Image (tube, rainbow, N blue to C red):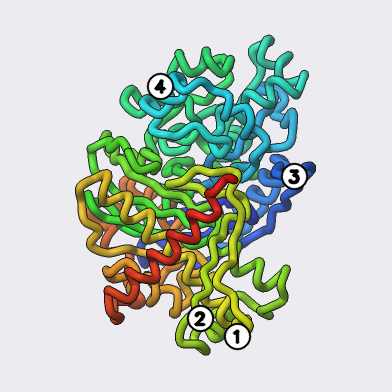
Amino acid sequence: MKGYLIALDAGTTSVRAMLFDVEEGKFVFSMQQEVGQSFPQSGWVEQDAEEIYFKSAYVVSRCVASVGADRILGMGIANQRETVVIWDRETGEPLAPAIVWQCRRTGEYCAKIPPAMQKKIREKTGLPVDAYFSASKIRWLLDEVPAARDSMRRGRLCAGTVDSYLIYKFTEGKRFVTDYTNASRTMLFDLKTLDWDDELLAYFGIARSVLPQALPCDGRMGEANFNGVRFPITGVAGDQQAALFGQACLTEGDGKITYGTGLFQLFNTGKRCVRSESGLITTIGYALGGEVVYALEGSAFNAGSGVQWLRDELGFLSSSAESETLACSVPDTGGVFFVPAFTGLGAPHWSSDARGLLCGITRGTTKAHIVRAVLESIAYSARELGDCMQKDSGICLREIKCDGGASANNFLMQFQADVLGISVNRPVEREGTALGAALLCGCALGLISEAEVPRRRKAERIFVPQGEGERYEKLYRGYLKAVARTLYKP
């Protein structure tokens, strides 16, 4: 009898469950539900954890019903990473809204952490001190939510990323676990010992009992129960690490870019835990078969959000896809540059004060020039991160694999290849995050070997550099000058 795996992708704006046919190596069914966000104050972003769970349970149950319970072999999970959920260990009820990775409420707290402690955090966790990561979010909840403090005193508080909350709920409270990749995004996890660090826990005032057990991606996370239907949960990773695996970036020097609301670029450094001197993140790529693979990561907070801004706020586009047509209608931007710093700049600058910039406008500037400038800015961000990765690792990028919504934009992908000076490889299956969760699950269950993974990823189109390298270097330098203006403080 044919068997299937469920890949649950619990993202920031939606949850999606996809049914993976192990034999055919493709997805055969998908169900998605949007998840709301709230913005109670400027810079704050929250979500309802129960909404995430109920909608996740719904899409998973639809996958089960589509083929029959006896055909489900297991479920892998990929999730938005740094978002924090706190809940009561006995009741399973959330004690506060989830604080989303985009939330900047703890920026001032992070800025006051002494330089010596910031250095120690960076050395142990590979992360710069920033409100992006989970530790300061947990601290804020303990400070501001009395029920959280009371629950921690009584040994009943659970604090985790979305994966750990979903696994807890799916296993009826029997399992409180996470995987190494999600743990590595908290500012509390030591990349060498692969465990929560007691010194960092003490500094943030977080009891070890509050945090989940950290396991490799292929660890047996528990057994899900859907109305009496039981199947193993394994193959768990943060969304960007899952995409790294789904894109078959399995050897040192392989890199991928996911184009979504933000831009996330990961670069496989193999068994080397490379410490960045350029403002990048050192993280765990994946942990499988008893081995840990490390990666360098650069996160640009805004990428596709720039296109959304053109469409929703400025009314320049009726659909995001229209941006390609408009960008191609002009030969260049007419000297216009755009820096998408709507919520500050992420790697390698880590400036929460930076704001978006549109410069070089003349009386002859049209909306087509501005649309093209917004798309070009995405490619420039990736170039800046790629340069940092090569400098830190001493390894040359050979090719970039791409996924995410904006990877469908042919203009952007060709411009990306021209700016990087290397080929950009776009797969047939654009849902790299879900594919990674499915493949990790299959490997964990012994249904797929790691050696098979590259064959499971099929290229749809490869974009090769076509333009004059000197021209693109000049354009890139112009973009860097624009970035410098956003960082300037009078």
Marks 3/1: CA–CA distance? 35 Å
Amino acid marked by disc 3: Ser
Other residues around mark 3 within 10 Å, as few (<14) / some (14–19) / many (≥20): few
Comparing marks 2 and 4, which lies closer to the viewer? 2
Amino acid marked by disc 4: Lys
Q: Is residue 438 above or below residue 351?
A: below
Which element type, helix, strand or loop, lies under badge 1? loop
* Residue identified by numbered label 3: 42
Amino acid marked by disc 2: Gly
Other residues around mark 1 within 10 Å, as few (<14) / some (14–19) / many (≥20): few
Marks 2/1: CA–CA distance? 8 Å
Which quarter of the figure is the C terminus placed in?
A: top right
Marks 3/2: CA–CA distance? 34 Å
Q: Is residue 97 left or right of residue 17?
A: right
Q: Are marks 2 and 1 in contact (CB under 8 Å)?
A: yes
Q: Earlier in the sequence, mark 2 or mark 4?
A: 4
* Residue identified by numbered label 1: 364
Q: Is residue 154 above or below residue 457?
A: above
Image location (x, y in percent) of residue 303: 53, 61
Q: Earlier in the sequence, mark 3 or mark 2?
A: 3
Q: Earlier in the sequence, mark 4 or mark 1?
A: 4
* Residue identified by numbered label 2: 334
Marks 4/1: CA–CA distance? 52 Å
Q: Is residue 369 above or below residue 16?
A: below
Image location (x, y in percent) of residue 264: 45, 54
* Residue identified by numbered label 4: 120
Q: Is residue 221 visible?
A: no
Which element type, helix, strand or loop, lies under badge 4? helix
